[in-house]
Amino acid sequence: MRAAVTDRPIAVRAFAFGLAVLLWAVGATAGSVKALKYRNADGHVTYTDTPLREHYQKLVRVIRFGPDPAQTRFSTKDYLRNRAAFTRLIDDAAQRLSLRRELLHAVVQAESAYDPDAYSRAGAVGLMQLMPDTAQRYGVSNSWDPKENVDGGARYLHDLLDRFDQNLRLALAAYNAGEGAVEKYGNQVPPFPETERYVKKVLANLQSARADD
């Protein structure tokens, strides 16, 4: 599962974020502001409050402007607000499935930084970045719904831990790259830079959570 990303140059991302801040500031005095978020065939994201030219074919999502998921990181106001809003939901899912709550939070933090509107070019969405086939497997009818998303993602993680004999590194690698990839490489973390970074990130999040307890 991939967290929300953008591969635009830093200067372009900075401009997009600046535009978001400007529109948010206008909305603070003129009512709520909505913006269109487009992604072209190359995966580049464009923000606007008006429709774009025809070659931007896919409207990815209509969002209420705030920091883009790719810009949201662990010290932002939105991150703290979202974490507080979804802590009980995540804790309940962990308890229901006998998962460590710290682990489930570590995965959510790595996947979406607690942003329920996070999505990736690959089609993963929501707090736990569910892919469409995973959502279908676990009966998730609306992956944008935080409760359904966390429930589906938590059940998938639970099943991966069972599949790989409670080997956390392999379960996390499978959550990111798929269980088939882990098995293809002899039940080892696949040698994919993204997957290797992901496993390290979740484990670091988990260690940090333990240190805070």
Image (cartoon, rainbow, N blue to C red):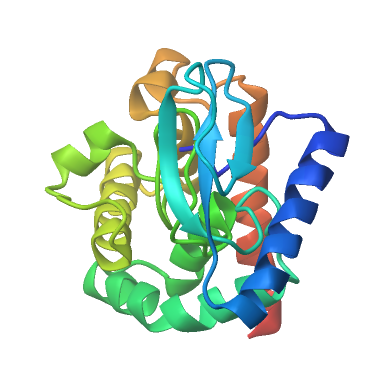
Q: Image point 81% across, 44% down: which residue?
A: 15
Quarter of the rendering containing residue 160: top left
Q: Position of residue 16 (x, y in %)?
A: 74, 45
Q: Quadrant of the C terminus?
A: bottom right
Determine the residue positioned at 63% across, 53% down. Answer: 68
Q: Nearer the viewer, residue 55 or 211?
A: 55
Percent x, y for residue 43?
Answer: 57, 23
Q: Quadrant of residue 183?
A: top left
Please tell me which residue is depicted at 69% across the width and 77% down the height of the picture: 77
Tell me which residue sits at (60%, 77%) in the image.
Answer: 30
Q: Is residue 80 above or below residue 59?
A: below
- Residue situated furthest right in the rendering: 11
- Decide if residue 114 is on the left or right side of residue 163: right
Q: Is residue 195 above or below residue 198?
A: above
Q: Is residue 196 above or below residue 150?
A: above
Camera-side residue of 99 and 28: 28
Tell me residue 142's x, y (percent).
Answer: 21, 52
Rendered location of residue 182, percent (x, y): 43, 24
Residue 55 visible to an observer of this rendering: yes
Look at the image and tell me whether residue 73 can be seen. no
Q: Nearer the viewer, residue 30 or 105?
A: 30
Q: Does 11 sit left or right of 116 as displayed?
A: right
Q: How many marks?
A: 0
127 is higher (above) or lower (below) than 83: above
